[in-house]
Amino acid sequence: MNSIERILLIGVALILLTILTSLLGWHSHEMLLVAASLGAALVLSAALRLRLQTKTGKVTQAALLDVEARVTGIVESAMDAIITVDEQQRIVMFNTAA
């Protein structure tokens, strides 16, 4: 469970606790208002963080695709043979000169 999921879970738990305490009449009206506000703030915070992570992920993915396209263009246009391998010595990429 990541930090956003934990924040979201705590916020939902506070909202549920607010509903339960109001049904049972355990706390004063002011305490219920504070708990509900805290829960709502945590849920909002988690939602905003999730949106930011999603947006950051999309920007990162676009940048990665751009870099991959540049590398492929350089490798394909080179007159010399280029062969790239990974950690297990498997061929990952090669150009027509290879």
Image (tube, rainbow, N blue to C red):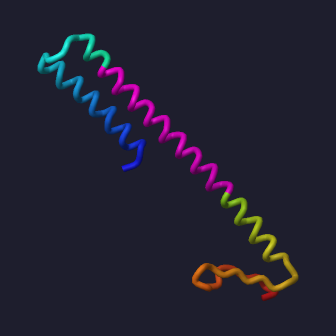
Query: At x 28% / y 27%, what residue is drawn?
Result: 15
The outermost residue toward the top is: 29
Relative height, residue 3 to residue 41 (above, below):
below
Is the C terminus in the top left, top right, bottom left or bottom right quadrant?
bottom right
Magenta-highlighted stretch: main secondary structure?
A: helix
Horizontal side of 62 relative to 34 (left or right) equals right
Relative height, residue 73 to residue 94 (above, below):
above
Relative height, residue 14 to residue 73 (above, below):
above
Pick the front one: 72 or 29: 29
Percent position of residue 49, x then y: 49, 38
Horizontal side of 36 relative to 51 (left or right) equals left
* Magenta-colored stretch includes residue 23: no
Percent position of residue 31, x then y: 26, 15
Extent of the magenta region: 35-63
Pick the front one: 28 or 59: 28
Query: At x 81% / y 87%, what residue is drawn?
Result: 97
Query: At x 41% / y 44%, what residue is drawn?
Result: 3
* Magenta-colored stretch includes residue 53: yes
* Residue 71, quarter of the rendered image: bottom right
The outermost residue toward the right is: 79
Percent position of residue 50, x then y: 48, 41
Query: At x 21% / y 24%, what residue is drawn?
Result: 19
Percent position of residue 42, x then y: 39, 30
The outermost residue toward the left is: 24
The outermost residue toward the bottom is: 98
Relative height, residue 25 to residue 67 (above, below):
above
